[in-house]
Amino acid sequence: MGGAERLERQRTGGRLDARARIEELLDPGTFVALGALVGSLQRGATPPAPADGLVAGHGTIEGRPVLVGAEDFTVMGGSIGLGNASKRHRLAQLAEQERAPLVMLLDGAGERAQNAFERRGRGPNDLQALAALSGLVPTVAVVMGPSAGHGALTAPLMDFVVMVEGAAVFSAGPPLVKAATGEDVTKEELGGTAVHTATSGVAHNA
């Protein structure tokens, strides 16, 4: 988790942290973490990134096994580092292997800028793995805050998508739109619940 101050800020805003969200979703006492000791893989990363911003694992919902991943906004804005990306891919692999449903709780800033400076071998990514799950197992995304960039591409690949009030899905947020086009736009206008439930069709419920 991102530390006491950031956790308190999250709760003061009326939002649960990633671990609390998983606890609310799963049957009590059933969550088993995957990659809990993964930190940021970027050299000299400051500050440290507990679980690299993604709490992941498996548990049960009403007795049925499920896999779950929750972006942790208190850790570097829920951004996706290399360890985070590996865990996302592993979740999708396990969902296919075990024929278990996959639930993703989205609340993050997308790919971390530092990833561009790290060497990565060629290979499947989590988005390819999610696409491969289509027709095999149920997949659900719950957008619980701003979901941008790579993380935002998760939602359109899932079978069922729910957005909470105040959530948004966009490839780039209002500051980047302003810098690129000079246009002032709110996150709701760019990719809020009304946009994705009534216009784009990305989300099914809000």
Image (spheres, rainbow, N blue to C red):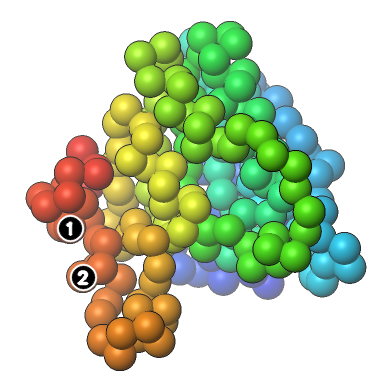
Q: Secondary structure at mark 1?
A: helix
Q: Which residue is mark 2?
A: 189
Residue nearest the observer in this picture, 70 or 4: 70
Instruction: State whether residue 20 is above or below residue 123.
Output: below
Instruction: State whether residue 129 is above or below residue 122.
Output: above
Instruction: Give the residue at x 68% y 63%.
Output: 116
- Can residue 13 be seen from the camera position used here? yes
Q: In the drawing, does residue 115 fall left or right of residue 95?
A: right
Q: Which residue is mark 1?
A: 195
**Figure quadrant of the N terminus:** bottom right
Give how far apart the Cα atoms at labels 1 and 2 are. 7 Å
Instruction: Give the residue at x 63% y 63%.
Output: 112
Q: Position of residue 69 (x, y in %)?
A: 57, 37
Mark 1 is on which residue type?
Val
For label 1, count other residues whose C-alpha is less than 10 Å away and answer few (under 14), some (14-19) or many (20+). some
Marks 1 and 2 in Cβ contact (< 8 Å)? yes
Mark 2 is on which residue type?
Glu
Q: Position of residue 67 (x, y in %)?
A: 56, 24
Instruction: Give the residue at x 43% y 28%.
Output: 131
Instruction: Pick out the residue farthest to the front.
Output: 122
Q: In the drawing, does residue 37 fall left or right of residue 101?
A: right
Q: Position of residue 50 (x, y in %)?
A: 77, 54
Instruction: Give the residue at x 89% y 68%.
Output: 44
